[in-house]
Structures are given as structure tokens and as C-alpha cells.
Image: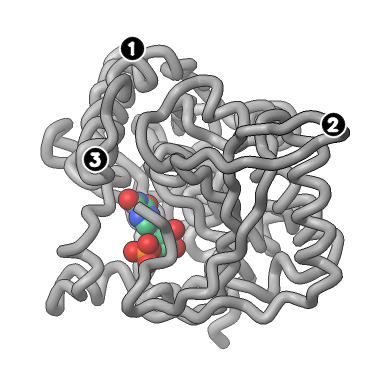
Amino acid sequence: IWTMHNFAEATIADFKERLGGQKVICALSGGVDSSVVALLLHKAIGKDLTSIFVDNGVLRAGEVAEVAGLFRDVFGLNLVVVDAADLFLDRLKGITDPEEKRRIIGHTFIEVFDAEAAKIAGEVQYLAQGTLYPDVIESVSFKGPSAVIKSHHNVGGLPEKMKLKLVEPLRELFKDECREVGRELGLPETIVSRQPFPGPGLAIRIMGEVTRPRLATLREADAIVQEEMRASDLYTKVWQSFAVLVPVKTVGVMGDERTYEDVVALRIVDSVDAMTADWSRVPYEILARLSSRIINEVKGVNRVVLDISSKPPSTIEWE
Ligand code: XMP
């Protein structure tokens, strides 16, 4: 019978036979798909898999340490963590256009990944990717409107450039099946049930220019949103929940002082496939806690607003 337990065992056995002794690379993002792919391959070929995690400077708070700690220290993966934050942030200087941000992040990622892969001893022949069944369908049938409106740069473009053969063990799985495989492989629930996080990361959640101070502000607000959503167990019930840094300052008051500071918007949506979405009816008490924590704890923020737009016509991300 078709269970995710059988799937994991059969895939690992198949990889052992087909890929044993060969060099494989994969881009680990910390998301569930790439994590499952990396673990399947690690269990099959061990150190012949090199997983590359690129710190692009627009990750969430604590992500680098979390991923390195889990995959290198707990699972024992042959993991390369590349600190490319300066390079990415330099190139993002002065850029405000969303598509331009995506292009820069996409190209820089490929460049950094490519350079890292070139350092691996022995010839790398395979690139493993976490393509899911819905991704396959989307790319062979017509491109949905979102594909035209926003370009999604993940690892697309890598295989052609690097002349690598693709290994895509999740091609026949839906997201919930991929999560189940993750559980079978012992991935912690924090990874297995993780909400989608865009490749361009926080760069497309900072309206206007991405600067280090604005990144620091958004990271703090975002961490509070993650924490409160997880604490209330809404985290796994909604599709995505995150903070957006608005490029506007508004007046506030603190003690006897007038303040003039940033606005954070909360974006919390329900969806089944991200093609359509509705804003989540989050209980007022949770919204109240999010608002007061962000305003009290995040320096430079004196106002929190709630995004109550559905997709369409609004998109989930603000850029
Ligand atoms: P939108 O904003 O188009 O987002 O409603 C739909 C889903 O896609 C994610 N998203 C991205 N993911 N690269 C990604 O890897 C991107 O450039 C990108 N833009 C949006 C978004 O988080 C949501 O889950």
C-alpha cells in the first residue's frame, strides 16, 4: 500500500542504488520541501550529498542558527552555510521596485550557489530539488496569473546553467504528503508544519528600500508574530501570518513626548493553494496582543494595522 513510510523507504533504497558513489548537491532553504529532499538523500548517500544553505541577508531572525543546528548538528548533514548577506544587501541598495528585488536576489543566489558548488571535490552530477506535484502541473499546463504578475525566483535556472541532472523525489507528492514524509524522517514539527516563506524573503516585506535598520525592525516584529501565532496554535491553522514594514511614518505619543515612527502591517491569510486567499478572522485578543507587543517591544514602531484584503484582487505578499 501507498503510505509515506513506504515512500520514504523506497526512495532511499532507490537513491542508494542509483546515486551511490556520485556527488549530489541541493539548496537547503529551511522550508519543508527542501528539508525533506535533503534528508532523503542524506539517508541514502550520506556525505556524497552536499547541502548548501545561503544566508541572503533577508532571512528571518534566528533562521541560520536554527537550520545549521538542526541539519548539521542533529542530522549530521554535510552542510555548507554561506554567509552572503553583505553581497545581497549591497546589491539591494537603493532598489525599491519589487520585481527588481526579486531579480537581484534570484541572480545573486544562483551566482553564490554556483560558486559554492564549484568548490566541492569531485564532479557534481546531480542537483536535488523539492519540486512538488502542483509545481509540475503548474509548469506543464498554463501559467496562472500570479506567475505573470510576480516572478518566483527560487532555484529555477540552476540546472541549465550548471549542466546538472535533476533529482526530484517529491514530484508525485502533494504538500501534505511531503509533510508526512518529513515526519517519517524525524523532522521536527517546527519544520514540517512551517508556513510558506518566499525566496526573496523579508526583502519583499519591506516596502521601499531594504536597509539593515529596516531589516532589524521587521525581523523583530516578524518574530513576535511567529511567536504569538505558534503560542495560540493558530500558526498551523492559517496559511501564512507575517508582518510587513510600511514606508510611512505616523505620529504617536509616548509619555509627554510626540513620536514619529514606522507602521507595521499584519498580514494573516487563509488559503488552500495560495492562488486565492482570504484574510483570517483572528480573535481580537490575539490581535490585541500582537499589536501591543510589537508597539512596546519593537523600537521605532508606534502603530500596527491589520490587512483585511482578500486575494484577488490583493496578493498575499505586499510586493
Ligand atoms: P502572492 O503574493 O503572489 O503569493 O499572492 C502567493 C504565494 O507565493 C509566495 N510568494 C513567493 N514565493 N518567491 C517565492 O518563493 C517569490 O518571489 C514569491 N512571491 C510570493 C507567497 O508567500 C505566497 O505563499
Give whichever of 147, 54 is nearer the camera. 147
Residue at the spot of label 2: 256
Mark toward the viewer: 1 or 2: 2
Q: In the rendered image, which quarter contains the N terminus?
A: bottom right
Q: How would you rate the neighbour count of disc 3 (Cα within 10 Å): few for under 14, some for 14-19, many for 20 or more?
A: few
Q: Is residue 9 above or below residue 23?
A: below
Q: Secondary structure at mark 1?
A: loop
Q: Amino acid at mark 3?
A: Asp
Q: Amino acid at mark 1?
A: Lys
Q: Mark 3 and mark 2 in contact? Answer it, CB < 8 Å.
A: no
Residue at the spot of label 1: 119
Q: Residue at x 44, y 40 (%)?
A: 247
Query: In the rendered structure, which disc, 3 or 2, sits on the residue that comes first in sequence?
Result: 3
Q: Position of residue 275 (x, y in %)?
A: 36, 77
Q: How would you rate the neighbour count of disc 2 (Cα within 10 Å): few for under 14, some for 14-19, many for 20 or more?
A: few
Q: Is residue 203 above or below residue 193?
A: above
Residue at the spot of label 3: 97
Res 51 label: none
Determine the CA span between mark 3 and mark 1: 34 Å
Query: In the rendered structure, which disc, 1 or 2, sits on the residue that comes first in sequence?
Result: 1
Can residue 276 be seen in this snapshot? yes
Q: Position of residue 28 (x, y in %)?
A: 48, 39
Q: Amino acid at mark 2?
A: Asp
Determine the CA span between mark 3 and mark 2: 38 Å
In the shown orientation, is residue 249 left or right of residue 171? right
Query: In the rendered structure, which disc, 3 or 1, sits on the residue that comes first in sequence?
Result: 3
Which quadrant of the picture is home to ligand 1?
bottom left
Mark toward the viewer: 3 or 1: 3
